[in-house]
Image (cartoon, helix red, strand yellow):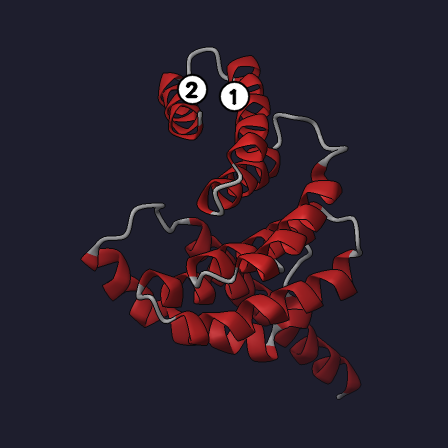
């Protein structure tokens, strides 16, 4: 009887882990550009993301941990429902700090996401310390790590939005140098970097 209970418990654990993996994979599939079909698909998936983030976080692997929170927040941000997005991003930071530690790249990613939400709301003074902290976390990563570009780009946009063009230009020049080094053939990324720099200077 005990063996049967242990087996059943193991199977339940495995099912929960498999469910969490499916949800994390679904978030990874989300394109950067919003379309009506994406929103319709997300409307079906978001309740499961909420269930995962609310009750199944212990069964998310460290690599999957931030995905459900990010997916839920993006769904709301895409629709300009910023108030609904904020608690999920705050919770993501809290759980990333607790599980992954103060210097983990996914914590930097989570800080950046909340900063972006604040920027969209015009809350620049709240966004800047989050981005600064995120930048400190990723400064020792290899420059090819995607979070380095992401956080540098967010800082440049924030400074530009505030009219702090000298700082924005400095960050953009650094970002452009990274893009040129890591992606000789990635002309669209370099073109976007040059475009951003031209707007700032």
- The residues tagged by marks 1 and 2 sit, at their Cα atoms, a distance apart of 7 Å
Single out the residue that lies furthest toward the left: 36
The residue that mark 2 highlights is 190
The residue at the point 50 percent across, 54 percent down is 116
Query: Which of the labelled discs sits on residue 176, or is there none?
Result: 1
Marks 1 and 2: CB-CB under 8 Å?
yes
For the C terminus, give its image quadrant: top left
Of 171 and 110, nearer the camera is 171
Measured from the top left, where is residue 35 in percent x and y?
Answer: 22, 53
Q: Earlier in the sequence, mark 1 or mark 2?
A: 1
State the image coordinates of residue 50 (x, y, percent, origin top left): 48, 75
**Camera sees residue 14:** no
Closer to us: 99 or 116: 116
Image quadrant in which the N terminus is located = bottom right
Quick one: label 1, few (<14), some, or many (20+) residues within 10 Å? Answer: many
> How many tags in the picture?
2
SS state under label 2: helix
Q: Decide: few, some or many residues near mark 2? Use Cα within 10 Å; few <14, some 14-19, many ≥20.
A: some
Residue 106: which numbered mark, if any? none
Residue at the outermost bottom position? 1
Which residue is rendered at x = 50% and y = 78% of the image? 51
Expressed as whole percent of the image width and height from the top left, the position of residue 46 reads 39, 70
């Amino acid at each position: 009887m005990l063996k049967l209970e242990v087996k059943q418990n193991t199977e339940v654990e495995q099912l929960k882990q498999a469910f969490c993996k499916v949800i994390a994979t679904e978030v990874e599939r989300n394109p950067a550009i919003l379309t009506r079909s994406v929103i319709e698909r997300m409307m079906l998936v978001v309740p499961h993301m909420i269930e995962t983030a609310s009750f199944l976080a212990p069964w998310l692997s460290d690599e999957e941990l931030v995905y459900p929170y990010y997916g839920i927040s993006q769904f709301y941000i895409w629709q300009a429902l910023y108030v609904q997005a904020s608690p999920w991003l705050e919770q993501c930071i809290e759980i990333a700090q607790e599980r992954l530690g103060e210097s983990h790249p996914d914590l930097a990613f989570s800080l950046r996401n909340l900063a972006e939400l604040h920027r969209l709301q015009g809350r620049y003074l709240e966004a800047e310390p989050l981005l600064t902290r995120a930048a400190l976390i990723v400064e020792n990563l290899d420059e090819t790590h995607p979070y380095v570009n992401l956080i540098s780009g967010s800082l440049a946009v924030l400074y530009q939005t505030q009219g702090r063009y000298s700082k924005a230009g400095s960050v953009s020049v650094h970002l452009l140098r990274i893009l040129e080094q890591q992606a000789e053939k990635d002309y669209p990324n370099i073109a976007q970097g040059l475009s951003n720099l031209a707007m700032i200077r």
